[in-house]
Image: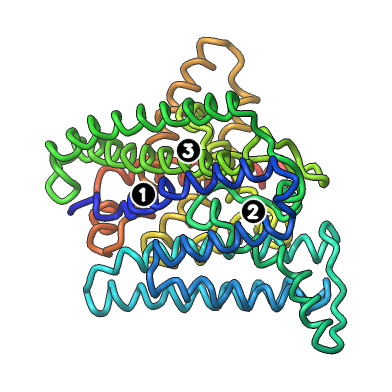
């Protein structure tokens, strides 16, 4: 199987790179008093529309239509109803688009258009912004605009007041990637002055560029290792573990590189960490914490740090409102949000079980292991086990065909999650007896 066919993130990176001059231009214009707040909203909105058309072609309407409808719902419904209707509409639209992808891949047995894949990725990010804004309105973090409309002048005034909503939903630095930016933070940035000095901006962007260059060099080396060796279809016994780990590392390096590039674009436009916090106290959350992700021996910590802004969004949207088994609900919704491919359903449900096991295993270990040599051994073993389980989950989530998923499940790699499943059963039974 050609694993690299799954990396449709590279074309996005090209368009993200092309948007850099406009992000820097926006940040520069924000230093001028003549560049008014409405002009800033219009600049970001127009840039989003142009970038959508360039990257997605005619598929851009699949993003523009729900953005327009979400804006209408948000500006017309009351705080009590807005989140329910916005969530229902956005997820229904996204699910229909994902069903189109399923039809192309599984029924027609055809490779989907690259532009359509980019559109789905952008649509998933739009869902984040729509639901984040609707939750803010529902919780009173964002004050809703007056909804009375009387006469033609009032209609124009109403549309002018909803401009920040439409601009937020489609602003170009976050259209194709990047960590989730709250509406309060977005509004504070647009209404404020430029947050970056020239030297500080150049240094920060240079540092991110060097990080991307280093990751790309590692990818070249690892790609040669993956390409030269056997794949899951022809690996034998323990060799499959090496294949799984190296392939998953290639996926991870790709994500790291793309996340840093996305953060750099937000940084260039002035939406980076240097801008500080929003009035509500919500700061910038980068998606890539590479050191923690590669060194942690806890699956639960890896889960919180992997794609951090999305993890925080899922926690706020699903986990905090879940009554029965909120962790399982969160991972099930994540599978739905990602498209409900068979590998995604299996992978995210497996991930939920691994996190549950992680809590019990480490709680038991902290109470049982006292000496530092045993603690060091324990951390080393659990680190290796965590990395291999994450590699297993990542391959399950990324594969598209049932045959590839079946090969993964029938390989020696399944031993690693099975060990945690057995420990989960034993420790849960022990906890039940103690209570």
Cα separation between marks 2 and 3:
19 Å
> Quick one: quadrant of the C terminus?
top right
Q: Residue at x 27, y 64 (%)?
A: 402
Counting residues from the start of the chain, the first of labels 2 and 3 encountered is: 3
Element on which disc 1 rests = helix
Specify few, some or many for label 2: CA neighbours under 10 Å numbering under 14, 14-19, or 20 or more: some
Q: Residue at x 28, y 74 (%)?
A: 106
Counting residues from the start of the chain, the first of labels 1 and 3 encountered is: 1
**Residue 105 at x, y percent in the picture:** 28, 72
* In-front residue for pair 37/269: 37
**Residue 326 at x, y percent in the picture:** 66, 57
The outermost residue toward the bottom is: 151
- The residue singled out by tag 2 in the image is 313
Element on which disc 3 rests = helix
Cα separation between marks 1 and 3:
14 Å
Q: Is residue 123 left or right of residue 77?
A: left
Residue 260 has which mark? 3
Q: Residue at x 22, y 74 (%)?
A: 109
Number of residue marks: 3
**Residue 196 at x, y percent in the picture:** 65, 32
- The residue singled out by tag 1 in the image is 14
Q: Residue at x 54, y 56 (%)?
A: 172
Q: Is residue 392 left or right of residue 286?
A: left
Instruction: Judge depth for marks 2 and 1 and give the one in front.
Output: 1
Mark 1 vs 3: CB contact within 8 A: no
Instruction: Judge depth for marks 1 and 3 and give the one in front.
Output: 1
């Amino acid at each position: 199987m050609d694993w690299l066919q799954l990396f449709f993130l590279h074309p996005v990176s090209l368009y993200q790179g092309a948007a850099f001059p406009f992000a820097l231009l926006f940040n520069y214009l924000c230093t001028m008093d003549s560049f008014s707040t409405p002009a800033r909203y219009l600049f970001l909105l127009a840039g989003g529309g142009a970038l959508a058309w360039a990257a997605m072609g005619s598929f851009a309407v699949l993003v523009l239509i729900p953005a327009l409808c979400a804006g209408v719902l948000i500006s017309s419904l009351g705080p009590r109803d807005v989140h329910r209707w916005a969530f229902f509409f956005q997820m229904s639209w996204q699910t229909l688009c994902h069903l189109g992808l399923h039809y192309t891949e599984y029924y027609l047995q055809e490779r989907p258009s690259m532009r359509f894949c980019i559109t789905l990725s952008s649509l998933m990010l739009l869902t984040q912004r729509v639901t984040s804004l609707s939750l803010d309105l529902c919780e009173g973090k964002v004050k809703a605009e007056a909804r009375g409309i009387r006469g033609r002048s009032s209609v124009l005034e109403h549309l002018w007041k909803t401009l920040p909503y439409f601009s937020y939903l489609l602003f170009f630095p976050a259209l194709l990637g990047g960590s989730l930016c709250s509406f309060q933070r977005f509004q504070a940035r647009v209404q404020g002055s430029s947050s970056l000095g020239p030297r500080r901006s150049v240094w920060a962007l240079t540092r991110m560029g060097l990080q991307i260059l280093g990751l790309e060099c590692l990818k070249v080396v690892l790609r040669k290792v993956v390409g030269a060796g056997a794949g899951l279809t022809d690996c034998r016994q323990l060799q499959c573990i090496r294949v799984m780990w190296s392939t998953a590392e290639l996926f991870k390096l790709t994500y790291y590189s793309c996340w840093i590039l996305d953060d750099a674009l937000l940084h260039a436009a002035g939406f980076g960490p240097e801008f500080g916090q929003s009035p509500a106290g919500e700061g910038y959350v980068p998606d890539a914490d590479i050191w923690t992700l590669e060194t942690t021996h806890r699956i639960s910590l890896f889960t919180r740090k992997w794609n951090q802004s999305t993890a925080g969004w899922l926690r706020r949207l699903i986990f905090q409102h879940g009554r029965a088994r909120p962790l399982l609900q969160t991972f099930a919704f994540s599978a739905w949000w990602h498209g409900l491919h068979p590998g995604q359903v299996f992978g995210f449900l497996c991930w939920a079980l691994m996190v549950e096991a992680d809590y019990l295993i480490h709680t038991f270990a902290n109470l049982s292991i006292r000496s530092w040599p045993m603690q060091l051994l324990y951390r080393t073993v659990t680190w290796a086990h965590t990395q291999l389980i994450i590699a297993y989950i990542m391959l399950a989530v990324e594969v598209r065909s049932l045959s590839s998923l079946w090969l993964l499940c029938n390989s020696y790699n399944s031993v690693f999650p099975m060990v945690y499943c057995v420990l989960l059963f034993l420790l849960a039974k022990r906890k039940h007896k103690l209570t």
